[in-house]
Image (spheres, helix red, strand yellow):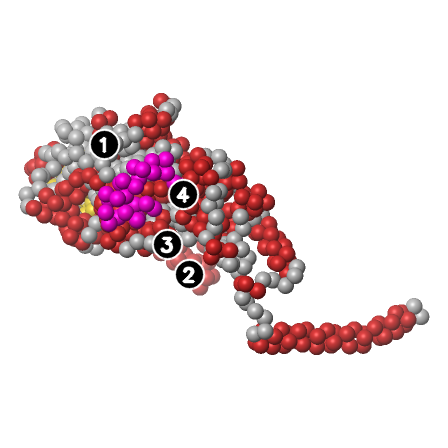
Amino acid sequence: METLQSTMHPAGTDAAAIAQLSWVLFVGGGLVFAVVMGLTAIASLGAERRRRFLSERKFIVIAGAILPAIVLTALLVYGLTLTGTRIAIAEADALRIEVTGEQWWWRVRYPDSGGDIITANEIRIPADRPIELTLLSADVIHSFWVPNLAGKIDMIPGTVNRLTLRATQPGEYRGQCAEFCGGPHALMAFHVVALEPAAFDIWLAAQREPAASPETALQQEGADLFVASGCGGCHSIRGTAAIGTIGPDLTHVGGRLTIAAATLPADAASFARWIRDNQYIKPNNLMPPFGTLSDDELAALGAYLEHLK
Amino acid sequence: MPRRSPRKKLKDRIRPRLKEGAAWFGIFIAAMIVGGFLFTWSGLYSVAATSGHWPGFGLFLEFGMRSSVRTHTIGIAVPPLHDAALIERGAGHFQEGCMPCHGAPGRAPNPIAHETLPEAPDLVASVPTWEPEELFWIIKQGLKYTGMPGWAAQQRDDEIWAVVAFLRQLPALDAGEYQALASLDVRDQAVSDEVLAQSGPPGVGLATCSRCHGLDGQARASGAYPRLDIQTSEYLFAQLAAYDDGTRQSGIMAPIVAEFDEAELRQLADYYAASGVAAADDADAASESESDPAVLEIGRALVIEGLPDEGIPACISCHGDNPAARSPLYPALAGQHASYIAQQLMLFRSGARRATPAAEIMAVIAERLTPAQIDAVSAYLSGLQPGAMSETAP
């Protein structure tokens, strides 16, 4: 799990380029540091002849001005070339995904995938296919960063930023908001799940479907409580009367890895905890705490939401 | 040097005298303290209310009280006090909480109140001698050693101002006008008696409730008090229980609820829930819907669609018409009086009403509403017929 969110373990072409640049800089910087330390040692402790050589004007001009200018210019050109090509150059077969930063979660849309696919806090992508992310903000400045896959870019209100990435292998990669956005900013994370292309297509097709109907009596009770408690004022469950757009779409919430922006696992017990105690779990988040519900009612709601795979 | 020595001599002469005087003063103070304590300990002073005050001492205490009230009310801003709902709200409480000691037009105070010291003043005469903010402060804080209590819900300044608004009207009222203000169903006394006789066990409680909420639960058209006929028994009982345990704060309702036990409160909730909304008074509803169409449209949009960009869900998502598809802790709103809805939303918004779990939910939403939006929502909801919210949904 230590590689779940790490720039040093790239799993995408863009992250790999960034990691490569980092290593070049680390190694190059280390070499320069070693040479300078060596010269410093010679200048302090070395023989008279060597110390005199180090203090000559010719050496100072070449090693102190010309050489750094050449090395730094080369590094700059290399770095800019490497990272510059990574931004906003969409490939023809790129999959477009729109991600909106909201206080304090992520709204994720698949605009080109037929049907109204909206999910939250989890971006599923096909592995080894270019992805073009359209990054928006609904309120304040957020920053989108999945270290294993790509660089970091801000989400600015009123501005559309784009980021391209390509996961080289299937896997789960954690991302998080990298710009302080108030209150529970620290609990605003998400996952990118890269799937084999065939598995991704199956997932996408399932996402187009409306929500699963309750199957057990407990799930039915949960569904009724969802309506009666007014959850649909803020949340949508496609195929039901719940059409709220303020909070995350819950149509397939039971199939996600986490809820509350990678704060809790998406299981029945977590749903129950979150609905009543969300202000303890994630203080100042924008959802009211539903202390009106009994333990049994929360269990029913949890069972219903978990069922929405 | 010749100039300094006489001064020094003067100083030398005065200093011992000062010291002597200070010593005597100290002895005098100590004697006063010891003597005062001994006098108090002896019990010679009578604390009997019937013994009255020493000549002039009552005037001195009055002077002290007026000075204290004057100083402590510096900086209190007085809100508008001419709203009919505000005056009626204050009148309803006055009958229950103030009249027993102070009396009212056409009503002598309880004889017990005559035997207090000081005697509770006749407010017809004394109200004009106070500024509104002074009345507010006295009602809120009470007066030490007089029997005048503070307000039972300190976070409800709005209720206290309602009493002040009523008090400002009081001196000009005759007995009939007072009755009409303080007791809703006095004009239908024959009907009241009949219903009270039929209503069985909740009879006594109903006499209290109906003064403000009416026997039909529709309350007053001004919106001084909420309609109860549109609510479920579960909701009404939950509110009464919350007044009783202090999680819903009201200096008007709490003293009334305290008079009844749980079984009686359930009977009263059942009575009003079963009173039915069929007998809606159309004239009242019509008078409330005479609002600006632009304002009503803002209200309609908030009620039916909400304002997602501002994080405001639609009212209808929780407060829909069908009580079976609504949490028993959520009230019906269609047809409720505008003044009451606006007042409660302002309480939610300010945090004065958020101690119950359901209020906690509403407070989160109400904080996102502006006062103008609150007025628009209230106007729109009050103009609806009970149970007719969803008819306007797209």
Of badges 4 and 3, nearer the viewer stands 4
Is residue B327 shown left or right of residue A71? left
N-term mark: 4 or 1? 4
Q: Residue furthest right?
A: B2
Amino acid under disc 4: Gly
Prevailing SS of the magenta stretch: helix
Residue that label 2 marks: A41
Specify whether residue B28 is in view.
Answer: yes
Tell if the residue under mark 3 belongs to the same chain as the one under mark 2: yes
Do callouts 4 and 3 mark residues in contact (Cβ within 8 Å)? Answer: no
Q: Give yes or no for residue B204 being in the magenta stretch.
A: yes
> Which range is magenta?
B181-208
Chain ID for label 1?
Answer: B
Chain ID for label 2?
Answer: A
Give residue B92's mark. 4
Tell if the residue under mark 2 belongs to the same chain as the one under mark 4: no
Give residue B278's mark. 1
Q: Is residue B175 above or below residue B147?
A: above
Specify whether residue A128 is in view.
Answer: no
Do callouts 1 and 3 mark residues in contact (Cβ within 8 Å)? Answer: no
